[in-house]
């Protein structure tokens, strides 16, 4: 669609300084200096681009801080105080049973404390589709705060209650919160954003995940909260962002696409769009949503169970599975695991390693911020290719550096450079972009089920790495990074060959791009939407290009 702005009355010659958009007989066009407004051949249509309004910006920040921040915070919150938490486990066991805890049982308890979080994330992902369809996107985010505030209180009082079981159960519950938020926030932001800002705003959740990790690392410093007395408070702070979101998010609109397509409430959808866009004329965007609704009705609304068998979504589904597996199996958790020993070997004092870890987290945040600003210019595919390529190369060089670390004096510094390079590569592509692309590859009825599949793969892969990597490390040592480099390379090749660029495309356009590969036709309420090669032809076919 073309949206216009009336700058001058129709008729008359355009004088110097009056070049702009004119209207004549209901038609709008851009007129250069010296032309007559009646000369329509001079006119070129001007597309109205979505802007970052106050409502859109605040809805983005509140939902990302209240939900995505907690995901990152709880990933890193138990790393720094792990020694004191294990001492608490031992002391509690001794008081109960009159004997010190066995090393194997302590290892089991700590492993459960760590692994319950991704396991909860997996179950949270399974809840995405039914909740977002029943409660809406915003409604699910508000409901999800239960799974943050309750475990925050549980972890905060665990030392007073003298129960390590409370911590393990609370980690599972807060994992459910992370599993929901990691999928619902990108979905919500993708549906309320104009198409020219969808990529940038889609990276905001990942930005707040990295900020959450950095916040946990800073608060985990021994001089702040990562000490013997304050670690329960540090664990309990995760409830504060949830409380802020619970108080503020109700004042912002629900997803207009959800209200119109899934609830059939056009009046509410129109009001929401007007608030989000900052202008009253949203009829064309509503028309695009109606067209998408007609197309989905012609094909039939999808359920979670039959998503895997839908031929029209086959390559989209394979793509999000590959990207989410590649994101988690590329070795990012292993890199962080090795970081402390790499810094120590390079001569960083044991007490200063915690500050080096904070520095690595800061690099992660900075590069994610950079991705926010470059994603709309560079596109999604280029960032994914560059990111996985950098990670692949860093893993190969790190393998060599770790093997020569003892014999070559300057090699530890190469190892540090590899760690930082890997973090940079992962932050610009593999970490944030899969969430953006998952939103863009699916239309309204299939999106909840797609996020459920993507989230399940994400958390299962996360859980698998945490479970398998210690065995890889003991069996292969530094050569385990060769496996990660191979996974990065395979993911890179798949993205290069299969995944299209989705920048500035409508959801229908992206679906059309996959239709040829899936060997299907996209149907609308008035018949089939023919396969077209060019963007211009597609615009002619669907009559709209909004969102």
Image (cartoon, rainbow, N blue to C red):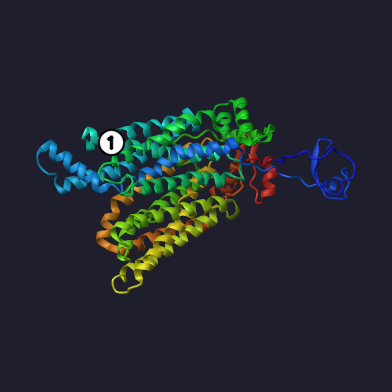
As displayed, is residue 529 above or below residue 264?
Answer: below
Density class for disc 1 (Cα within 10 Å; few <14, some 14-19, many ≥20) is some
Residue reaching furthest left?
Answer: 98
Residue reaching furthest front?
Answer: 223
Q: Is residue 489 visible?
A: no
The one of 503 and 280 positioned closer to us in this rendering: 280
Q: Which residue is mark 1?
A: 169
The secondary element bearing badge 1 is classed as helix
Residue 116 lies in what quarter of the image? top left
Where residue 172 sits: x, y (%)? 31, 38
The one of 367 and 179 positioned closer to us in this rendering: 367
Where residue 51 sits: x, y (%)? 64, 42
The image quadrant where one finds the N terminus is top right
As displayed, is residue 163 above or below residue 462?
Answer: above
As displayed, is residue 359 above or below residue 169?
Answer: below
Q: Is residue 158 visible?
A: yes
The one of 420 and 190 positioned closer to us in this rendering: 420
Q: Is residue 8 left or right of residue 338?
A: right
Q: How many marks?
A: 1
The image quadrant where one finds the C terminus is top right
Q: Residue at x 11, y 37 (%)?
A: 97
The one of 44 and 344 positioned closer to us in this rendering: 344
Residue 70 lies in what quarter of the image? top left
Where residue 447 sits: x, y (%)? 50, 38
Residue reaching furthest bottom?
Answer: 408
């Amino acid at each position: 669609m073309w949206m216009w702005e009336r700058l001058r009355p129709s008729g008359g010659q355009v004088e110097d300084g009056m070049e702009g958009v004119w209207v004549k007989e209901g038609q709008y066009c851009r007129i250069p200096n010296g032309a007559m407004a009646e000369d329509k051949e001079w006119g070129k249509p001007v597309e109205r681009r979505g802007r970052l309004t106050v409502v859109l910006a605040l809805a983005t920040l509140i939902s990302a801080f209240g939900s995505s921040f907690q995901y990152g915070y709880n990933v890193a919150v138990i790393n720094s105080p792990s020694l004191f938490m294990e001492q608490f486990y031992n002391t509690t066991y001794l008081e109960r049973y009159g004997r010190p805890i066995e090393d194997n049982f302590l290892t089991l308890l700590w492993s459960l404390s760590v692994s319950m979080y991704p396991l909860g994330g997996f179950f949270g992902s399974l809840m995405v589709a039914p909740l977002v369809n029943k409660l809406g996107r915003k409604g699910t985010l508000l409901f999800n705060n239960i799974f943050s505030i309750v475990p925050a209180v549980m972890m905060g009082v665990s030392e007073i209650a003298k129960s390590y079981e409370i911590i393990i159960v609370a980690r599972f519950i807060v994992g459910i919160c992370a599993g929901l938020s990691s999928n619902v926030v990108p979905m919500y932001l993708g549906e309320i954003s104009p198409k020219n800002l969808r990529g940038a705003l889609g990276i905001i959740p990942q930005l707040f995940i990295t900020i959450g990790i950095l916040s946990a690392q800073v608060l985990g410093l021994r001089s702040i909260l990562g000490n013997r007395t304050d670690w329960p408070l540090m664990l309990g702070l995760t409830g504060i962002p949830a409380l802020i979101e619970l108080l503020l998010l109700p004042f912002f609109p629900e997803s207009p696409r959800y209200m119109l397509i899934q609830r059939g409430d056009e009046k509410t959808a129109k009001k929401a769009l007007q608030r989000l866009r900052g202008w009253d004329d949203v009829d064309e965007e509503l028309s695009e949503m109606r067209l998408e609704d007609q197309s989905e009705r012609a094909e039939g609304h999808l359920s979670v169970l039959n998503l895997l068998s839908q031929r029209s979504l086959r390559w989209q589904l394979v793509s999000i599975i590959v990207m989410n597996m590649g994101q988690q199996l590329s070795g990012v958790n292993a890199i962080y695991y090795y970081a402390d020993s790499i810094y120590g070997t390079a001569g960083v004092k044991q007490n200063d390693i915690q500050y080096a870890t904070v520095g690595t987290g800061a690099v992660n945040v900075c590069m994610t911020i950079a991705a926010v600003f470059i994603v709309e210019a560079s596109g999604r595919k280029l960032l994914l290719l560059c990111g996985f390529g950098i990670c692949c190369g860093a893993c190969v060089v790190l393998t060599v550096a770790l093997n020569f670390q003892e014999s070559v004096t300057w090699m530890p510094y190469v190892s540090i450079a590899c760690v930082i390079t890997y973090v940079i590569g992962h932050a610009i592509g593999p970490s944030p972009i899969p969430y953006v692309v998952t939103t863009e590859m699916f239309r309204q009825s299939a999106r909840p089920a797609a996020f459920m599949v993507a989230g399940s793969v994400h958390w299962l892969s996360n859980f698998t790495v945490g479970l398998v990597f210690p065995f890889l490390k003991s069996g292969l040592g530094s050569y385990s990074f060769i496996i990660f480099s191979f996974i990065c390379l395979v993911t890179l090749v798949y993205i290069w060959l299969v995944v299209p660029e989705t920048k500035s495309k409508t959801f229908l356009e992206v679906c059309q791009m996959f239709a040829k590969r899936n060997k299907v036709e996209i149907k609308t309420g008035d018949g089939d939407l023919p396969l077209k090669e060019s963007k211009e032809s597609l615009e002619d076919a669907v009559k709209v290009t909004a969102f």
